[in-house]
């Protein structure tokens, strides 16, 4: 059990690096499709740096808690747009199991996209799909700035509900303290 807590500056830096990788490639997307919820912020930053104004979102549910998924991902908000011949960039925060990205890629392909590429900030070594563009590979559970409050609740439940080793309890408590200090730094 390892955690990595990111700051907003980390997200901007990583998104800019991701944008440079995409710009240096031969791929020129017409449309960005962000996965709800983790892909929204990186997609918005990428849209600015890649000068892509057409952004759509797909809602998918899969994670039920920190490190826990349901049996399979389910699209809860499908795209309702004609993608015929469009070059589409799918954006999410992390390729963890890869199952969500695979499902969304199939969904977009079925809507007639010309070509499809995937961009994520992070990739896990065990992901079933390798994003075409990513910034960092990690085996840590990543806590992004847009999910601090969600992470606090999940980690507190994990402390109370699970039979954890003293080492894992310490890691969770250290992570909670790190998030608390970050949130305090944003207060007046």
Image (cartoon, rainbow, N blue to C red):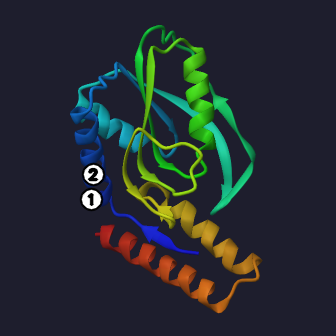
Identify the mark at residue 44; answer none if there is no mark: none
In this rendering, does residue 79 appear at all? no
Q: Position of residue 101 (x, y in %)?
A: 56, 38
The image position of residue 54, as x and y in percent, is: 36, 20
* Observer-nearest of 96 and 12: 96
Task: Name the residue located 30 percent from the left edge and 59 percent from the top edge.
Answer: 10
Instruction: Decide if residue 30 is in sight here.
Output: yes
User: Circles 2 and 1: CB distance less than 8 Å?
Assistant: yes
Quadrant where the N terminus sits is bottom right
Determine which quarter of the picture holds residue 126: bottom right
Q: Tell which of 51 and 121 is nearer to you.
A: 121
- Alpha carbons under labels 2 and 1: distance apart: 5 Å
Quickly name the residue at label 1.
9
In the rendered view, does 130 fall on the left or right side of 42? Answer: right
Q: Is residue 179 left or right of residue 152?
A: left
What is the x, y in percent for residue 148? Answer: 48, 63
Q: Which residue is mark 2?
A: 12
Q: Please, what secondary structure does the residue beneath circle 2 have?
A: helix
Residue 144 x %, y %: 44, 58
- Observer-nearest of 159 and 185: 159
Q: Mark 2: few, some, or many residues within 10 Å (few <14, many ≥20)?
A: some
Label 1 Cα crowd, 10 Å radius (few <14 / some 14-19 / many 20+): few
Q: Please give the name of the residue rendered at 28% of the width and 69% of the height, measured from the top-left corner.
A: 188
Residue at image location 67% in from the left, 32% down from the top: 76
Residue under the point 46% across and 63% down: 138
* Helix, strand or loop at mark 1: helix
Placement of 67 over or under 180, stated as above or below: above
Q: How many marks?
A: 2
Q: Is residue 103 above or below residue 7?
A: above
């Amino acid at each position: 059990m390892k955690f990595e807590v990111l700051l907003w500056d980390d997200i901007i830096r990583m998104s800019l690096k991701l944008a440079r990788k995409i710009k240096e490639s031969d791929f020129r997307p017409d449309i960005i499709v962000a996965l709800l919820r983790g892909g929204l912020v990186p997609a918005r930053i990428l849209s600015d740096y890649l000068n892509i104004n057409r952004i759509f979102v797909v809602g998918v549910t899969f994670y039920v808690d920190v490190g826990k998924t349901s049996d399979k991902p389910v699209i809860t908000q499908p795209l309702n747009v004609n993608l015929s011949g469009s070059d589409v960039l799918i954006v999410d925060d992390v390729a963890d199991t890869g199952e969500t990205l695979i499902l969304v890629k199939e969904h977009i392909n079925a809507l007639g996209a010309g070509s499809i590429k995937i961009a994520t900030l992070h990739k896990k070594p065990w992901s079933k799909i390798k994003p075409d563009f990513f910034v960092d590979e990690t085996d840590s559970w990543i806590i992004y700035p847009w999910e601090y409050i969600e992470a606090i609740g999940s980690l507190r439940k994990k402390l109370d509900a699970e039979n954890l080793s003293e080492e894992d309890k310490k890691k969770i408590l250290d992570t909670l303290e790190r998030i608390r200090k970050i949130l305090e730094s944003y207060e007046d």
